[in-house]
Image (spheres, coloured by chain):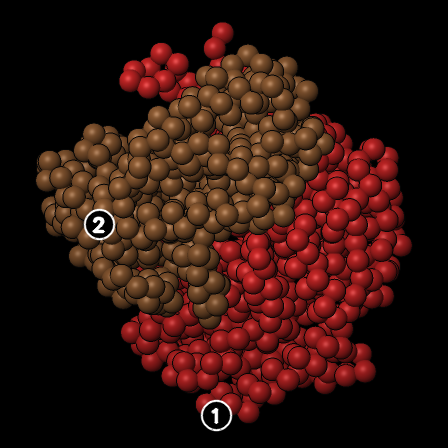
Chain colours: A red, B brown
Amino acid sequence: MSGAAAAAAPYRAKTTEQVANFLERIAVEIESLGDSLVQTAHQESGLPLSRLQNERERTINGVRIFAELARDGSWVSARIDIGDPSRKPAPKPDLRTMLIPIGPVVVFGASNFPLAISVAGNDTVGALAAGCPVVIKAHPAHPGTSDLVAGAIGRAVIACGMPDSVFSMVHGAGYEVGLALVRHPDTKAVAFTGSLAGGRALFDAAAARPEPIPVYAEMGSINPVILLPGALAAGAEQIGAAYIRSVTMGVGQFCTNPGLVLGVASQPLERFVAAAARAAENAAPATMLHRRIRDAFMKGVTRNEATPGVKIEARSRVDAQSARTEAPVVIFSTTASVLEAEAHLSEEVFGPTSAIVKCRDRAELEHAIGQLTGHLTASVHGTPQDLEEYSDLIAMLENKVGRMIFNGFGTGLEVCSALHHGGPYPATTDSHFTSIGQGGIFRFARPLCYQNFPQEALPEALRDRNTKNIWRLVDGRMTQEHIGS
Amino acid sequence: MSGAAAAAAPYRAKTTEQVANFLERIAVEIESLGDSLVQTAHQESGLPLSRLQNERERTINGVRIFAELARDGSWVSARIDIGDPSRKPAPKPDLRTMLIPIGPVVVFGASNFPLAISVAGNDTVGALAAGCPVVIKAHPAHPGTSDLVAGAIGRAVIACGMPDSVFSMVHGAGYEVGLALVRHPDTKAVAFTGSLAGGRALFDAAAARPEPIPVYAEMGSINPVILLPGALAAGAEQIGAAYIRSVTMGVGQFCTNPGLVLGVASQPLERFVAAAARAAENAAPATMLHRRIRDAFMKGVTRNEATPGVKIEARSRVDAQSARTEAPVVIFSTTASVLEAEAHLSEEVFGPTSAIVKCRDRAELEHAIGQLTGHLTASVHGTPQDLEEYSDLIAMLENKVGRMIFNGFGTGLEVCSALHHGGPYPATTDSHFTSIGQGGIFRFARPLCYQNFPQEALPEALRDRNTKNIWRLVDGRMTQEHIGS
């Protein structure tokens, strides 16, 4: 960490153009790794090559998106209130605020996206774009993939004349290496994507420091799906089939996996269940990321099976091969009272499983929604009339999640400015910030205000002449104009 | 807290216009309290009437500023990426994100601003403007003042038809009442202005909850002042006199009080010290807020006096009357090595005292700046040439503080959009947010994303028709336009 700390000042002194070029060079260097990157990731993760090819594209695009954000420059959220030395009774000070880098950041690679949420993922690139040095804690499930990407970033550091330690990576299988990084006094922020237990341990360690620091942990969730009557009447079968496509996507190893479905018991709900069961039975078992994840999945499934009041609605017809680290698709059903009584049914079982909760009536559905904790997403299947009729339930759901999806599922993220991938605890440890998309840059920046500074001593973004043509709030008005003549 | 939780949904359902009217009514109701408010605050705090009259104006203006912010509506930071169902290979989802209220908020009144940072202070009004119910923990040093303001807000609640428990207040002298509020499961955020010990205790309690919540604690600091050679050569005497005016403002009971001055030993620095000493000796002792604060002040001063290597440069010539809870002005001087060796010299002594550190040379000044922890502000006295010559030291300082002041002092805040009143720990527990000014609203809001929602089910701020004419980021472009035709 002390290397990263030493790099902070020289890196912050780089121009936005230099930072943007650096990020673009990272994208080029990752591209230059060619097929060896996808092959290595395939061997280490067992993920299909086609999925990894897509993930590589998403990763490279992500790097370029942040290069563009850095070059554009408006993300610094400049706010200027022009001074008035002649104001009575007291002069009005000149105040100019912008976001500056928060300092050296530790990023933990995630297991389930060995490229897109790992060494060159949103957090790394967002932190670099914000002007922060980054130390990666590589995920032990894909060390070779991590080394390849770290090598690419290292070559970009040299090619662009960036400070040596602006980027570095450490390996380590246990908790201790990661905790030591979080506890290091030079660390100023931590980003993590993974389990609730892992994220909470980092959060607790950071909060207990003499100088507490923010931990942005995205810890997954079970992403409730609400089925409203109009939608069920119109297309129970289609929704059931789409649900299983979402449950099985990436072998269920997405933090947006729909783990819990809530609906009022009815004939159409039974048609939904039947369609989902057919699709689940026909879904072939598939290889999970690694054995520890598969073991945890099977343990969770076995626990649900053994829970009184929980019924197995469907299971992949083909047997899952343990030797191939395969997981079957397993769909449960239960009642709202069992859901409330058995707390573990509301906990994530990472993998292709989900539970359908048949509520007695609207009141029980409302009660079940009220009991939900924080989640990344909630899906609402309904007609526009349903949305109106159930608007109070929708409003309750809004307070529980970071993203609401209408007539769809949360799997499959669109990386863009308007994406928010976050949510109230335990989905994340900080509901203000997103872990995916351009908004991720705000995790790694904080405001600094300059009072009465002369023009030439101000950062470029705050000078009267708006040379980079960025958007600024000047005397309360959004504008790209220069100040004065 | 459960009352506040029950008020959350109906309060969030109010229009921005209704919220703005409610805030304006609060301002009117506080105005209607007339002189009794200032009289009561005077009796409880011992602060001069003129100061309290100004503080009342600032408080009422602050409420109106947030009414305007709520009515304007752009603060929700709407971001829209328009969907494209025909995109290949996969349709592009429609994503629309805005800030929504974080939930019920607990606000702790501060002792040193019985009006402006108390019951109707920036945090209360910011939270109400964001759409959050507020529970106030009244400061025990001004219960009558708190009751008056709470009564005014209560009348506004009734007059505007707001939910009963959108605002409430509890009294209590010990820590336990406050901690119970922080630990209550319905509390979603906490705002506090006060001591490091108090703020840290709340932060620790919130981090230890089953569901951790953010604590925005502003805990004051000693606000380093750097004197550069050019400025000293040009006006050591004027800076010395201005320094004592800042140290004694509000009997030193401001969190922006300049508690530490750093400069390189020189003839001009001695002239600064001499001028400051003259002004300090002539400054009359004045009454502090209450006896506990005065006792803590005298204890801190006595400790510094007894520290080897610390010299008293000046003390109010007139004796301070303990019976009147008066504090003398006391100015110390010391060396950089003593500052580093004696940790308590870097801790805030709340009141009219400050220490001048005479560094041997530039290297020692740089080392001393490197040792600083987080502060709300830093002041730099220099010429434009000084700023250029010492730009590396200025950059170091920027990483330590929330506001940099050129040729001035941090006391006296201008409440406006560009103000940032915050800073790295231990100045605050969350460097992302300000405790004063419009930006304070962001403490109490978090993003929520809507995917593929029909127009009529979207909040007004996210619909195609931008009826409120707010600024939105649409497909990456800032605009006030409608979407589509």
Q: Residues within 10 Å of mark 1 (few under 14, many from 20)?
A: few
Name which residue lies at 60% across and 68% down. A201
Say left or right for A116 vs B191.
right
Asked which quadrant contains residue A286, the reply is: bottom right
Residue A363 placement (x, y as % from top left): 29, 74
The amino acid at mark 1 is Pro
The residues tagged by marks 1 and 2 sit, at their Cα atoms, a distance apart of 57 Å
Q: Nearer the viewer, residue A390 or A170?
A: A170
Asked which quadrant contains residue B135, the reply is: bottom left
Name which residue lies at 84% across and 44% down. A154
Residue A395 placement (x, y as % from top left): 34, 58
Q: Secondary structure at mark 1?
A: loop
Q: Where does label 1 land, which residue? A: A308
Residue A110 placement (x, y as % from top left): 69, 61
Q: Residues within 10 Å of mark 2 (few under 14, many from 20)?
A: many
Q: Which chain is disc 1 placed on?
A: A
Could one spot residue A79 in this view of the protein? Answer: yes
Q: Which mark is residue B102?
A: none
Say left or right for A371 vs B339.
left
Q: Which chain is disc 2 placed on?
A: B
Name which residue lies at 58% across and 42% down. B309
Q: Which mark is residue B142?
A: 2
Same chain for mark 1 and mark 2? The answer is: no
